[in-house]
Image: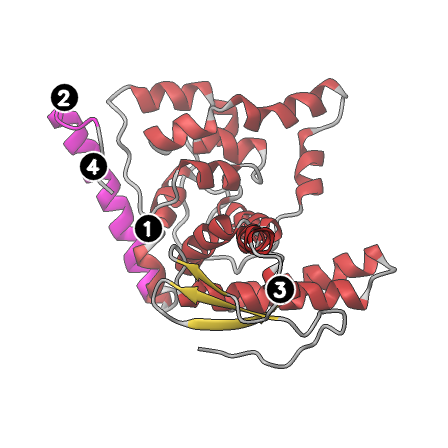
Amino acid sequence: MSNQSESPNPTSSSNKITLKTSDNEVFEVEEAVAMKFCTVKQYFDDENNNNVTSGTSTTLIPLPNVESHPLAILITYCKKHLEIKANNADNKKEMEIDMEHYEREFLKNVMPQELTELILAANYLNFKEALDFFCRAVASAIQNKSVEYVRKFFGLESDFKPGEEEKLREEFAWSFEGVDED
Amino acid sequence: MCPRGRGLVENEEQYENKKMKSIVVEEQEEEEEEGSGSERETGFVDLNQDMLHNVLKFVDMVTLGRAACVNKLWSKVALDDRLWAPFIIYRRRGLPWAFHRMILRPPPIDPQVFSRQIEPWV
């Protein structure tokens, strides 16, 4: 897959960490990127504690629950995230603006279906920023939409017993005003 | 997704489903006319309960209320008190709930426009 070998982040050490996905793709990433994935970090820390002499850069970390496609996207996102953070280390406001701009661009290239596997991968890797970001993206897609739209968007069917749905709709009647039209 | 709780009152449910399907079909036809987003038809596979909770953390109160009416799983997740807590706190402080929405700033996603207008529920 995409092998991003150039290092945009000057603060990252030269240490590389190798990640192996469930479909046997191998990714080599900088330590700084891998450390953003708390699951990987945990694994790495445990490893280091167990044999102090290691310190080599040839650690291979298996990720049995992550496929290569979402991981590639997550790594790209993570690199950009670190880059923006490094560029605006002293200006938080500017960093947020840059980040928002990047996220907006980022979403243009992501299909709604991909978001599911991205969310699951980010959750497994315990990459909080990405998880929040993708969840926000899904949330904004259903923001102020009708129940029917949500069902269609998620490929769901109503499984209420008759009467249950009417009762809920009555209870939440205030939320059914001013539905977005799309 | 396999709908649960089926088979109790088959007739009314079938009627409901038929109604739903006709709505969906109409929407799909119009979408195809638009010539965009046919890949969206498959929709999401499924988010499990935790991930759904994560998503619903970022919606506003109106969307949360509607989410409770989607199906049983959604209803269970959306009625979680933890999701409603922020709105209650804002209300106690006398802030409008729209404030909460402003803070969360959901990123703009390409609007997936259906030309069909969904009638507001009476």
* B26 or A129: nearer the viewer: A129
Label 4 amino acid? Asn
Q: In which quarter of the image is the N terminus of chain B?
A: top left
Q: In this view, does A59 lie above or below A152?
A: below
- Circle 1 or circle 4, nearest the eye: 1
- Report, in whole angstroms, how far the alpha carbon at label 1 lies from the one at label 4: 20 Å
- Circle 1 or circle 2, nearest the eye: 1
Label 3 amino acid? Val
How many labels, in total?
Answer: 4
Is residue B49 visible in the rendered image? The answer is yes
Relative to A131, B102 lies left or right: right
CB-based contact (under 8 Å), mark 3 and mark 4: no
Disc 1: which chain?
B
> Which residue position is annotated with label 3?
A33
Asked if marks 2 and 4 fall on the same chain, the answer is: yes
Secondary element at image label 1: loop
- Report, in whole angstroms, how far the alpha carbon at label 1 lies from the one at label 3: 29 Å
* Residue depicted at 59% across the width and 80% down the height: A5
Occupied quadrant, residue A52: bottom right
Among numbered discs 1 and 2, the one appearing first in the sequence: 2
Which region of the structure is painted magenta?
B5-32
Relative to B47, B54 lies left or right: right
Label 2 amino acid? Leu
- Report, in whole angstroms, how far the alpha carbon at label 3 lies from the one at label 2: 53 Å
Secondary element at image label 2: loop
- Report, in whole angstroms, how far the alpha carbon at label 3 lies from the one at label 4: 48 Å
Is residue B19 found inside the magenta-colored segment of the image? yes
Numbered mark located on residue B8 in the image: 2
> Which residue position is annotated with label 4?
B17
Numbered mark located on residue B45 in the image: 1
